[in-house]
Amino acid sequence: MQLHISGHHLDITSSIKQHTNEKLSKIKHHFDNVMNVNMILEVQKDVQKAEATIHLSGTDIFAKAQSTDMYVSIDQLINKLDSQIIKHKEKLHNHRG
């Protein structure tokens, strides 16, 4: 899995990268076929935004979250992505029958 993190008005620290990798391991636990993850972290005044696109074989999944704390935004983002990946996995499983 390739992870690309970029920041707008924000320096990406090693602690942010480590936190993100730890949370993304939750997604890899549910679905092994994750190809690429592009994540954009942004700061606008008091709002910390996180958005990501996950490229899977056959589809792309997008989610975004915002909060007053960047780590909370990342956690919310990963939870949204995780639920979307579980739905995608169920669709694949039901479709293959």
Image (cartoon, grey):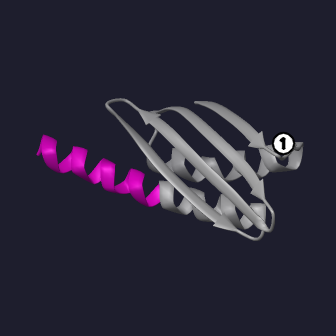
Farthest left residue? 97
Image side of residue 23 versus residue 54, left or right: right
Nearest the eye: 54 or 65: 65
Q: Is residue 75 magenta?
A: no
Spot occupied by residue 22 in the image (x, y as percentages of width and height): 70, 50
Q: In this view, does 71 lie above or below 88?
A: below
Q: Name the residue under label 1.
A: 12
Q: Is residue 75 above or below residue 23?
A: below
- Give the residue at x 11% y 46%: 97
- Give the residue at x 74% y 61%: 48
Spot occupied by residue 27 in the image (x, y as percentages of width and height): 53, 49
Q: Give the residues in magenta.
A: 82-97
Name the element at disc 1.
Answer: loop
Nearest the eye: 75 or 12: 12
- Give the residue at x 76% y 61%: 70
Image side of residue 5 versus residue 27, left or right: right
- Give the residue at x 37% y 55%: 86
Count of picture labels: 1
Q: In this view, does 85 lie above or below 45?
A: above
Check disc 1: other Cα within 10 Å, few if <14, some if 14-19, many if 20+. few
Spot occupied by residue 34 in the image (x, y as percentages of width and height): 48, 35
Q: Is residue 87 magenta?
A: yes
> Chief secondary structure of the magenta span?
helix
What quarter of the picture does the N terminus occupy? Answer: top right
Amino acid tagged 1: Ile
Image side of residue 27 versus residue 21, left or right: left
Quadrant for residue 71, please give it.
Answer: bottom right
Quadrant for residue 43, please give it.
Answer: bottom right
Farthest front residue? 45
